[in-house]
Image: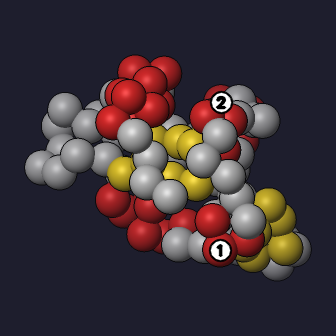
Amino acid sequence: MTISNAVRQLVRKRARYLCEYCHSSEEASAALFAIDHILPRSLNGSDDLNNLALACQRCNGYRYNFTSGIDPITQAVVPLFNPREQQWSDHFSWL
Ligand SMILES: [Zn+2]
């Protein structure tokens, strides 16, 4: 199913035209950002607004269809950042 242009614009505006993962600016990017499925379609993620996030090409590529990763410090499997459920400042408090 294709995401409508109206939904794309809603996601972009809600994100204030910033990547919801790294906060880079779409305006400063050479390419438009992607509409990312937080829970990938391949894992039955929906096109609901709560499952969509604006993502720069790099973040979208790194996320691919992963929902978890290995913490490089603890080696524990941890869920990837979810911009709908977590605050960026809390998740990246070490920055
Ligand atoms: Zn990004």
Label 1 neighbour load within 10 Å: few <14, some 14-19, many 20+:
few
> Residue tagged by mark 1?
42
Task: Please state if 19 lies on the left or on the right of 85 as rendered.
Answer: left
Determine if residue 92 is in view. Answer: no
> Residue tagged by mark 2?
89
Give above or below for 1 relative to 91: below
Give above or below for 60 relative to 20: below
Residue 6 sits in which quadrant? top left
Q: Nearer the viewer, residue 43 or 78?
A: 43
Q: Nearer the viewer, residue 17 or 93?
A: 17
Determine if residue 51 is in view. Answer: yes
Q: Residue at x 65, y 74 (%)?
A: 42
Mark number for residue 15? Answer: none
Q: Residue at x 79, y 61 (%)?
A: 79
Q: Residue at x 65, y 30 (%)?
A: 89
Q: Residue at x 36, y 62 (%)?
A: 58
